[in-house]
Image (spheres, rainbow, N blue to C red):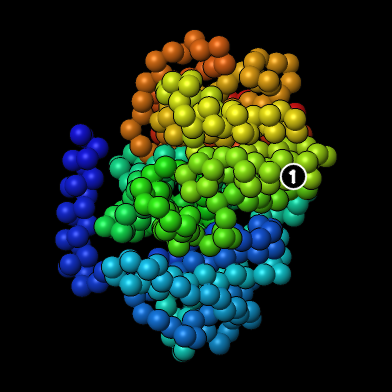
Amino acid sequence: MLYTRRIFMTAIVTLLLLSVAGCTTSHHVYLTWQHDPSTTMTVNFHSPKLHEDLRLLFDTESRDGDLAAYAQRASGNVHQIPGLRDGRYIYDVEATELEPGTVYYFVVAAGNKALTKERRFRPLPPKNAPIRFISGGDMSILPRAWRLTKMAGNLNPMFGLVGGDIAYGNGAFKNAWMWDKWLNMWDQNMVTDDGVMVPMILAMGNHEANDKDGSPAEVAPFYYGYFAQGDSSYYTRSLRDDTVLIVLDSGHSVPHGGEQAAWLDSTLAAHADTRNTIAIYHAPLYPSHRDFEDGRAVAGRENWLPIFDQHALRVALENHDHTFKRTKVLKGDQVSESGTVYLGDGCFGINPRDVPEPDRWYLEKAEGTPHVWLVEIDDTGMHYSAIKESGDVLDEITFK
């Protein structure tokens, strides 16, 4: 009830601000990846107008918005989401053949006019270099989410992983304002000390989906329509020569099993020699708040756990339960000397829940504490730190 009242009051304030501004569509600018994160970057842009000649201008030096001075340019795609009332145009433009780890200055332009101020992006460094990123899920647009994203931005991550339940819009067009507020929050807070925008990699959660029958894009119109990450809710990103990230859909727009499970099996098999395999998805196989026999947990263990075990997945980043969690090392649905550690459990802004059974056989540590995971990977291994709102370390674990 408290969450509902807060959302209602936020809606009133937002609508008043939009009325004063005399517009209904923000010119959002944010970053995703569709291909190699070290050599590409996708700039996403919203506009109330159709710009047939929209393009991305970018350079390794600041040009202060002088359109003719930018050395490189790219054009991309535009679409609308059928049924979205304001009819906004959503653009995605991919910059390719980038120098890894290099800061690029960019503007979005149409004709002889810059549509954005000059911003900065940076692809991931060379594949043998250290990386750092943050991970969390179940965000919302509550004040705690603003505080946690601000704290996370101050950690200077190279990108942010979001494990579903992003804006809590429930796939409803009437809740488009929530996505506007969430995108504004990310834009304001997820910026590094040197002014570089933090790209996002997103998994889907249950609060991205509506209760309609239809295609995945109809079930989760904002997830598929706003974020250029490819045409599927499950995909991979190569983070380093020794590290691959696997993004999965825990039954929200496609089933756990069938084509997705077959893809997961073949993908992990193809990375049999990859040192660090990381999966992120929304609903946990090993919940900390919900019952162990929760439907999505059972579906995950039935369809994915044998694949995780067969191919020795090292880390699973889980969400959905609004808690902090670290499991013991698990394999074959029991504690093991080798196997997978499951970290979670989605408390990156939403109100936390309790852990009713902290002594469950698979839990190493769990509590109802808001946090974000900071992940640092180099040639020595992977280090995961759970960071509280205060910036203090709640927990940490290293994988050699």
- Tell me where residue 71 sits by quadrant: bottom right
* Viewer-side residue, 71 vs 92: 92
Return the residue at label 1: 266
At 53% from the left and 27% from the top, the residue drawn is: 298
Q: Position of residue 150 (x, y in %)?
A: 41, 45
Q: Nearer the viewer, residue 121 or 86?
A: 86
Image coords of residue 355 (percent x, y) = 41, 18
Q: Is residue 281 left or right of residue 310?
A: left
In the image: residue 38, left or right of residue 217:
right
For the point 57% across and 79% down, which residue is it?
A: 75
Position of 360 relative to 297 (above/below): above
Looking at the rendered structure, the kind of residue marked 1 is Ser
Please give the name of the residue rendered at 53% of the width and 62% of the height, measured from the top-left corner: 228
Q: Residues within 10 Å of mark 1 (few under 14, many from 20)?
A: some
Considering the image in quadrants, where does the N terminus appear? Answer: top left
Q: Secondary structure at mark 1?
A: helix
- Residue 220 in picture, x, y percent from top left: 42, 54
Q: Is residue 217 above or below residue 313?
A: below
Q: Position of residue 127 (x, y in %)?
A: 76, 51
Which residue is found at the position 73% from the left and 16% from the top?
Answer: 337
Q: Quadrant of residue 334?
A: top right
Answer yes or no: is residue 130 visible: no
Q: Is residue 333 left or right of residue 17?
A: right
Q: Nearer the viewer, residue 87 or 189?
A: 87
Image position of 71 with respect to 121: above or below: below
Displayed quadrant of residue 382:
top right
Residue 39 is at least partly visible in this image: yes
- The quadrant in which the C terminus is found is top right
| Count of marks placed on residues | 1
